[in-house]
Amino acid sequence: MKVPQLHVGAGTALGPLSIFPIWSAARGELGISTGTHANVAVNELPSGAQVGKLVVTNNGPRPALLLEGELLEGGQQHRTCAQDVVLGSGETRTIETYCVEAGRWQAGKKSHHRLARRAPLNVRAELTSRVGIADASDRQSRIWNRVSRFDAARGASATSSLVEHLERPVSPRFEATAAAPMEGQRGVLIGLGTQPLLLEMFGTHTMFLRHYRQLVDSALLDLELLPAQVLNSGSLSGQRARDFAALAQEPTMGTFDGGPLASTRNHGSLRSRPLKVLRGALEGAGTAVEIPGRQPEVAHLTLWNTQHPFMKMA
């Protein structure tokens, strides 16, 4: 499997944040619900709550996709999905999560709610990176450290809650309106300063629309963490954006039933498998699906520039 052919459109700049629209040559319908249109219930483990695990159930009629970095709010503490999760209709699974609210553990609160909000890029970068991380507990500590950066930059939250920071208004100097999604758009390429940071794409235009606004809203928070030299460095050029998109199309991810992380799951109307990309400065993860009678397709993929200073912020 390979990333489908990508086309990069003209970018727009929101201060040092650059957003370029992405189109792909993939087919346009996967029959997957996602975002707030996915009827997914989220609960603590019935055997006893654990920081790193939640139980999710798809109560909708179609397969559902939860995204890496999607916030699962409430329960004993706010969590975020550790990786993409596909659920068939009626399917229940225990999933891996990380806490994004270090100061609360509220016994008796079992259920969560979903607004399909995403963690800011500062936190999501830690979710994706597999380099130099000894184990999950180490990653959890690093995620708490990244959440605490918002406490330092924006004023402390009583429980060091990432959700609370998303609900506060951004600094007036970063208030901005992103361009509306374009017809057929499948994703975005995001730059911070003059360097590309992230390319995120979806299998269909509709899936992209379900997450676009939440992605931009959370990324605006990241601007408050940038050092002055990045804030004043200018924006990402179109040529650099196109070069990064071209680099993203080079890696192969094996056949659907082979290659890295080829652990397929059957969800009734389709099968899914995780994707992993690690090549040079490019690192990413996502999900591929296979529908009977069709070739496997990418449903969601994030690709990060690991050389960007934002990935290495201490």
Image (spheres, helix red, strand yellow):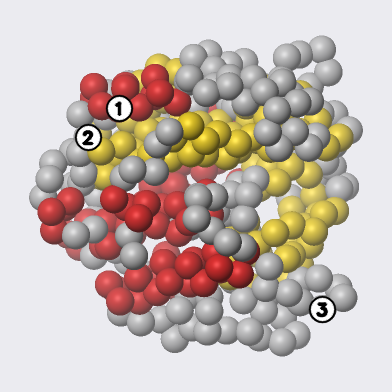
Q: Amino acid at mark 1?
A: Ala
Question: Residue 19 occupies which quadrant of the picture?
Answer: top left
Q: Residue at x 57, y 84 (%)?
A: 104
Mark 3 lies on a secondary structure that is: loop
Does residue 302 appear in this view?
Answer: no
- Quadrant of the drawing holding the C terminus: bottom left
- Quadrant of the drawing holding the N terminus: top right
Count the labels in the image.
Answer: 3
User: Which numbered circle lies on residue 169?
Assistant: none
Q: Amino acid at mark 3?
A: Gly
Q: Residue at x 68, y 68 (%)?
A: 52
Does residue 294 appear in this view?
Answer: yes
- Quick one: label 1 or label 3, which is nearer the N terminus? 3
Mark 1 lies on a secondary structure that is: helix
User: Which numbered circle lies on residue 241?
Assistant: 1
Q: Amino acid at mark 2?
A: Leu
Vertical relation: 148 (above or below) 197: below
Q: Residue at x 63, y 30 (%)?
A: 299
Mark 2 lies on a secondary structure that is: loop
Residue identified by numbered label 3: 48
Do labels 2 and 1 touch, CB within 8 Å? yes
In the rendered image, residue 134, in percent from the top left (x then y), is placed at 58, 61
Report crowding for label 1: few under 14, some 14 to 19, many 20 or more residues within 10 A (C-alpha).
Answer: many
Residue identified by numbered label 2: 236
Horizontal arrangement in the rendering, residue 222 relative to residue 30 (left or right): left
Vertical relation: 279 (above or below) 82: above
Question: Residue 55 occupies which quadrant of the picture?
Answer: bottom right
In the rendered image, residue 166, in percent from the top left (x then y), is placed at 42, 65
